[in-house]
């Protein structure tokens, strides 16, 4: 029976989430994001989204809509062709793909299906805190490991994992490249993580959302088969963030367990699936242009930051489509910087969104946007530093 003082009209929250404090003047974060979305002049550097695509993916989705394919339910586990295209893209064979409404849902299913209260999970700080929120619901403890240090090359190292793991560690979470820093793992590092997982009966969750922006990337599934969960996203390199499309790639036994946790038994967005197939089939036609633009854009940011006293880029070049600008030496609070830039029609993100320990040090900016918009950012940022330093 429930406690006698249980208030059915005002129930207690069952789960905890990292608090998202909206900027001053907003009742809640959703109101803030809606304002950002509705402002069509806003330069979008705050959510790591990709705005560099032509019409190939859009045309495929428009055709699907025009034919009214959306009137029918898709296959509940997704189109077989799409799943095979994902495996081909990664170079995997004899694995399974579970499609979901974005990589975020994939992360949730992995935590729900595989973690128990006696388990603990290792995650970096800075990192993508939504993963930690999910893990906290099902594991006994999430161990956030500080990695904001040049000594560790701003990423979770095998040495750091050894220092923080014990017999109850069930999962190591590798965000690769890392949101928000853009650091990326070497093949030797992944092999070492794989060996640790094999020897200690642990899962490796390999979130490769930003993989295609990197200079060189490796897949830990190749070194720890059957213990790896590869998180695949269409939000970033494919530019489909608003369509909520992603998946988990893993061994068939692992995917079978994840399927039992699925809520969306009627399948994922059919329009997005057509766009995803078109994107995968034509990837070789457009990916080099997008990577060339993003590397050029971050070079412009680097050249601008190098001229500002007290500011620096912890990771450069970034192997993702975002980086952080450390403002600690300028004496400027990243939230003040973010608020100032919004008034200039530039949306960026303060560090507290991705770090409890270091969020007051840096601003995160993404640069998979047209170069003219990055040039405007590079023009306005030094002015913002001067204005905020004066205040």
Image: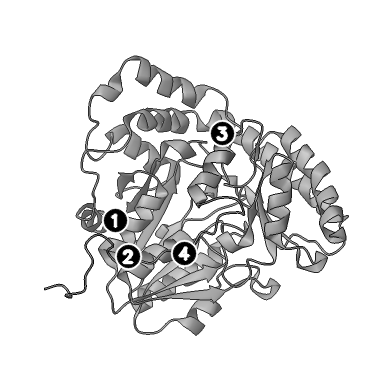
- How is the rendered protein coloured? one colour
Q: Which mark is residue 217?
A: none
Determine which of the numbered discs, if any, sits on residue 18 in the image. 4
Picture residue at 58% right of the left edge, 40% below the top: 36
> Dot 3 surroundings within 10 Å: few (below 14), some, or many (20 or more)?
few
Residue shown at 37%/61% (left/top)? 228
Per the rendering, the mark at residue 38 is 3
- Dot 1: within a 10 Å radius of its alpha carbon, few (fewer than 14), some, or many (20 or more) residues? many
Instruction: Judge whether 245 appears above or below 72 on screen.
Output: below
Left or right position of 328 against 9? right
Answer yes or no: do the residues labelled 2 and 1 have beta carbons within 8 Å? no
For label 4, count other residues whose C-alpha is less than 10 Å away and answer few (under 14), some (14-19) or many (20+).
few
**Foreground label between 2 and 4:** 2
Disc nearest the viewer among 1 and 4: 4
Mark positioned earlier in the residue sequence (3 or 1): 3
**Which residue is identified by label 1?**
251
Residue 246 location in percent, x, y? 39, 44
Pick whichever of labels 3 and 4 is earlier in the sequence.
4
Real-space Cα distance between discs 3 and 4?
Answer: 25 Å
Residue that appears at 48% across and 67% down: 191
Q: Earlier in the sequence, mark 1 or mark 4?
A: 4
Q: CA distance from mark 1 to mark 4?
A: 31 Å
- Earlier residue among tags 2 and 1: 2
Q: Can you tell which quarter of the image residue 68 is in?
A: top left
Q: Quadrant of the N terminus?
A: bottom left
Determine the secondary structure under disc 1: loop
């Amino acid at each position: 029976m429930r406690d006698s003082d249980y208030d059915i009209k005002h129930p207690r929250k069952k789960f905890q989430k990292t608090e998202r404090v909206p900027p001053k003047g907003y009742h809640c974060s959703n109101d803030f994001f809606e304002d950002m979305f509705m402002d069509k002049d806003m330069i979008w550097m705050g959510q790591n989204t990709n705005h560099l695509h032509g019409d190939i993916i859009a045309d495929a989705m428009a055709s699907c809509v025009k034919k009214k394919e959306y009137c029918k339910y898709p296959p509940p586990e997704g189109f077989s062709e799409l799943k095979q295209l994902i495996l081909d893209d990664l170079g995997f064979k004899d694995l399974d793909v579970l499609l979901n409404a974005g990589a975020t849902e994939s992360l949730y299913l992995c935590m729900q299906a595989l973690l128990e209260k006696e388990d603990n999970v290792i995650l970096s700080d800075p990192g993508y805190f939504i993963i930690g929120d999910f893990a906290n619901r099902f594991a006994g403890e999430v161990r956030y490991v500080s990695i904001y240090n040049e000594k560790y090359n701003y990423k979770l190292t095998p040495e750091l994992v050894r220092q923080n793991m014990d017999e109850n560690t069930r999962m190591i979470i590798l965000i690769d490249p890392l949101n928000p820093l853009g650091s990326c793992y070497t093949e030797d590092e992944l092999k070492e993580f794989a060996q640790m997982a094999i020897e200690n009966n642990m899962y490796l969750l390999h979130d490769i959302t930003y993989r295609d922006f990197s200079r060189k990337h490796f897949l830990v599934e190749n070194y720890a088969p059957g213990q790896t969960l590869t998180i695949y996203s269409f939000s970033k390199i494919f530019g489909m963030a608003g369509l909520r499309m992603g998946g988990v790639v893993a061994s068939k036994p692992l995917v079978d367990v994840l399927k039992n946790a699925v809520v969306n038994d009627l399948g994922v967005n059919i329009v997005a699936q057509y766009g995803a197939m078109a994107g995968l089939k034509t990837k070789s036609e457009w990916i080099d242009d997008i990577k060339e633009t993003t590397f050029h854009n971050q070079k412009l940011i680097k050249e601008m930051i190098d001229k500002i006293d007290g500011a620096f880029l912890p990771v450069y070049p970034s192997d993702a489509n975002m980086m952080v600008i450390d403002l600690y030496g300028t004496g400027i609070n990243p939230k003040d910087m973010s608020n100032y830039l919004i008034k200039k029609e530039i949306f960026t993100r303060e560090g507290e969104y991705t770090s409890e320990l270091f969020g007051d040090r840096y601003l995160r900016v993404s640069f998979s946007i047209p170069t003219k918009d990055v040039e405007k950012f590079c023009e306005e940022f030094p002015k913002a530093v001067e204005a905020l330093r004066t205040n």
